[in-house]
Image (cartoon, rainbow, N blue to C red):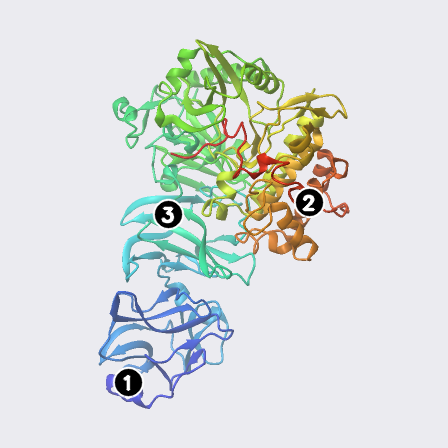
């Protein structure tokens, strides 16, 4: 009888159009849709490309030209094309109201409300949530059913990922099988709540990626503690429920998280209205060390040491040396020596993602770190401990028993982890730390033996080559102690002679600053001249800001951090070191980025030492056209203000994401300085900001940086600020001077007068060195 009444209602129901609600006397057919109140989302029937024979009832963004489906009702039972379907609230034989999707008397999808209701309505909210509720009760606590409790492959702002501990109801995201089949794939994302709750991605039942546990600030597996420019993350846990959710920093932004079966990744996406496409703001897992258990039990993964990213914890050795040498780390590590319980101690590992909490005791109490240590030490089976909440001085305990799985270094985030070792290992650790401190105090640069560098670079293997420029190739190497290095090999035909080589060694040996690249030593042997630097895993700045994919990862906080770091490094060279040093080749490819995206100025082969307030002159102009100050490029005069000019160019490139194409004119008749000056004078400076970050950047900081950049590229060196004043302007709210017309000198000199600038992107004579580190 219920199906007959349903069939009649299919024909007699009122037409649903331009509304967000279905009542008990209405239905939704295949030519109708529901649209949320503010037209954010739409509910209706749709087909997928290359699979038009099947139709699905789903929710998608209403105002986005690319149909983006965020939820489906009948993902396992599609509607066939020939026979129409209908969605409606139907009364069953038991006199209960049920929401059903029906096709030719066959129920494709249905839901039963959590309780009986007199007058139910189905409503599509502006959040994208489809809710079944009492007609006169809009309290979300009283919803009879909601789609947010049944996610498909997408997590929207306000959706919960987690578990109801009373009912065991689990809210879990599951990927589509593929882009043309929305049925449930084998990739899932949910919350493991057995011990210390953690987010886990699985392929089938196998763990694929562990995002970690909430430590009061963030998830321990998140790569950075810096706030996201798009997402705000929230974690909630009590005796009744545990869940993760996110909201948006800017509520006008359209953003979502999608579990993608084809890439096996969780994508963080935001809509770019200008480009009319979805931009990827993050993806997980992101590297080798994110793969679950990449280094096996008791193995620690450090992606900065790739390809040899795995290492055993101190006091452990590889379970199979043969597998380890073959870079097969799944077997993990075993203890070298047995524990003695009473005399054991703990070694501290900083900046760590905590291990998988499956074998963890989670003591969510007000215990401090010392009390956690005592608790672990008293239990001979306890292998490691940390604070479960790292806010303030830390409180609560997490204790691990058995093997420690899924360890990795998190250089930009992470927390301290204390691992149990026998007393003999504590003595070894103390000696090693003491030797390290002595080496750090000794600033004399060692001379490396050529054979050790040949071994480290595998005889300067082409596979280790990072790039090549005017002074010769650069190689990646690994010393016997496992430390990675970058080796600059001066070619015999190089334009950098012995003088420049000795200059670079002598200068950097005297310089110690966190924003300058560190020189470990040099080698002059058998006609070889080598410089050995610290290796920068993130390569150089130009590979980020000028690459269409990488620049999307460079949010405003990263760029501003890099700008300030470069300025501080330059301040050290000009003012705070024992010498006044002019770099003369400051450019994006000479700014290296460490694992935490800290900038380091590199390549000092062209640098010169000056007296206070001195200007020097040279007949041999070297450097990179496009970054050279006009007085240096045209007349050979250089001073600290020459570096300030280069910094201004660099600053404008970082903000705009555009490369200054030399000092010659581009096709549109402008170089970057003229381009920026035109927008500034026309009152349109906001249009200079890189489109990939304009919606999420600190506008006042960005505008301030544009003004500082224009001040740095003034025509007259005396009008440019000192770098110390630049640092002050970047770090304070002082009123900035108004810039005069900058050095648009290409319009005032012909190509005959300045022939070098007419060469297509004329390179620096020091174009590469260790900074052009292209990935291989």
Q: What's the mark number on residue 316?
A: none
10 Å crowding of disc 3: few (<14), some (14-19), many (20+): some
Q: Is residue 716 visible?
A: yes
Any part of residue 224 in sight: no
N-terminal-most mark, 1 or 2: 1
592 vs 489: above or below? below
Q: Are marks 1 and 2 in contact (CB under 8 Å)?
A: no
Give above or below for 115 relative to 336. Answer: below
Which residue is label 3 attached to? 200
Q: Residues at badges 2 and 3 in contact (C-beta under 8 Å)?
A: no
Taking the view exactly as shown, the residue that stands out farthest to the top is 526
List x then y, in percent, for residue 531: 50, 19
Mark 2 neighbour density, 10 Å: few (under 14) some (14–19) many (20 or more): many
How far from the left and from the top, in percent, is residue 203? Answer: 29, 48
Identity of the residue drawn at 26% across and 65% down: 50
Q: Which residue is mark 2?
A: 710
Question: Dot 1 lies on which element?
Answer: helix
Q: Position of residue 698 (x, y in %)?
A: 62, 51
Residue 4 image position (x, y, % from top left): 24, 87
Task: First in sequence, mark 3 or 1: give its number.
Answer: 1
Whole-Å distance between the Cαs marked 1 and 2?
71 Å
Residue to which mark 1 is pinned: 6
**Is residue 689 shown left or right of residue 611?**
left
Badge 3 marks a residue whose secondary structure is strand
């Amino acid at each position: 009888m219920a199906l007959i009444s349903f069939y009649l209602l299919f024909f007699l129901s009122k037409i649903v159009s331009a509304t967000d609600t279905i009542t008990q006397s209405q239905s939704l057919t295949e030519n109708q849709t529901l649209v949320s109140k503010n037209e954010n989302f739409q509910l209706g029937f749709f087909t997928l490309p290359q699979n038009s024979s099947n139709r699905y009832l789903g929710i998608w963004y209403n105002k986005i030209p690319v149909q983006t489906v965020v939820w489906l009702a009948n993902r396992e039972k599609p509607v066939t094309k020939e026979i129409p379907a209908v969605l409606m609230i139907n009364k069953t034989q038991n006199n209960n109201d049920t929401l059903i999707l029906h096709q030719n008397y066959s129920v494709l999808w249905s839901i039963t409300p959590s309780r009986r209701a007199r007058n139910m309505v189905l409503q599509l909210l502006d959040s994208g949530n489809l809710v079944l509720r009492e007609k006169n009760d809009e309290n979300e606590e009283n919803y009879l059913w909601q789609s947010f409790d049944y996610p498909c492959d997408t997590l929207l702002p306000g959706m919960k990922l987690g578990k109801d501990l009373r009912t065991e109801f689990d809210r879990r995201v599951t990927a589509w099988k593929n882009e043309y089949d929305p049925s449930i794939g084998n990739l899932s994302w949910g919350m493991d709540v057995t011990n210390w709750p953690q987010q886990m991605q699985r392929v089938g039942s196998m763990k694929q990626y562990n995002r970690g546990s909430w430590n009061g600030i963030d998830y321990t597996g998140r790569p950075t503690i810096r706030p996201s420019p798009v997402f705000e993350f929230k974690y909630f846990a009590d005796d009744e429920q545990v869940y993760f959710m996110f909201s948006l920093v800017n509520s006008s932004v359209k953003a979502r998280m999608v579990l993608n079966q084809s890439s096996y990744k969780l994508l963080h996406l935001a809509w770019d209205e200008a480009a009319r496409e979805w931009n990827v703001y993050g993806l997980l897992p992101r590297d080798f060390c994110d793969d679950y258990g990449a280094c096996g039990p008791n193995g620690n993964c450090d992606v900065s040491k790739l390809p040899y990213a795995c290492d055993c914890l101190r006091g452990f050795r590889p379970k199979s040396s043969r597998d380890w040498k073959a870079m097969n780390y799944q077997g993990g590590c075993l203890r070298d020596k047995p524990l003695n319980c009473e005399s054991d101690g703990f070694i501290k590992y900083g900046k760590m993602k905590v291990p998988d909490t499956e074998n963890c005791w989670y003591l969510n109490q007000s215990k401090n770190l010392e009390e956690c240590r005592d608790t672990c030490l008293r239990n001979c089976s306890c292998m490691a401990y940390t604070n479960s909440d790292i806010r303030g001085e830390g409180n609560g305990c997490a204790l691990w028993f058995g093997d420690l799985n899924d360890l990795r270094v998190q250089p930009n985030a992470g927390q301290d982890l204390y691992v149990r070792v026998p007393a003999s290992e504590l003595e070894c650790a103390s000696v090693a730390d003491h030797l390290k401190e002595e080496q750090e105090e000794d600033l004399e640069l060692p001379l490396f033996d050529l054979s050790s560098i040949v071994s480290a670079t595998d005889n300067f293997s082409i596979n280790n080559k990072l790039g090549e420029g005017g002074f010769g190739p650069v190689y990646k190497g690994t010393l016997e102690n496992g430390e990675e290095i970058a080796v600059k090999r001066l070619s015999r035909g190089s334009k950098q002679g012995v003088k420049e080589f000795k200059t670079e060694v002598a200068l950097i040996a005297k310089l110690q600053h966190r924003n300058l690249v560190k020189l470990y030593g040099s080698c002059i042997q058998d006609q070889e001249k080598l410089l050995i630097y610290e290796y920068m895993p993130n390569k150089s700045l130009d590979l980020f800001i000028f690459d269409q994919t990488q620049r999307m990862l460079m949010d405003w906080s990263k760029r501003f951090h890099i700008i300030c770091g470069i300025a501080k490094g330059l301040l050290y060279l000009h003012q705070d070191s024992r010498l006044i040093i002019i770099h003369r080749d400051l450019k994006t490819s000479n700014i290296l980025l460490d694992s935490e995206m800290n900038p380091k100025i590199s390549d000092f082969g062209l640098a010169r030492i000056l007296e206070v307030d001195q200007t020097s002159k040279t007949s041999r102009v070297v450097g990179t056209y496009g970054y050279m100050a006009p007085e240096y490029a045209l007349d050979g005069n250089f001073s600290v203000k020459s570096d300030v000019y280069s910094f201004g160019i660099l600053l404008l490139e970082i903000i705009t994401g555009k490369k200054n194409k030399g000092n010659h004119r581009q096709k549109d008749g402008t170089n970057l300085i003229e381009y920026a000056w035109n927008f500034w004078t026309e009152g349109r400076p906001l249009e200079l900001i890189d489109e990939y970050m304009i919606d999420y950047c600190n506008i006042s900081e960005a505008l301030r940086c544009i003004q500082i950049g224009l001040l740095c590229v003034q025509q007259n060196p005396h009008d440019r600020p000192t770098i110390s004043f630049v640092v002050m302007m970047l770090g304070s709210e002082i009123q900035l001077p108004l810039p005069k017309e900058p050095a648009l000198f290409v319009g005032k000199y012909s190509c005959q007068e300045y022939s070098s600038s007419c060469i297509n992107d004329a390179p620096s004579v020091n174009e590469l060195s260790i900074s052009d580190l292209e990935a291989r």
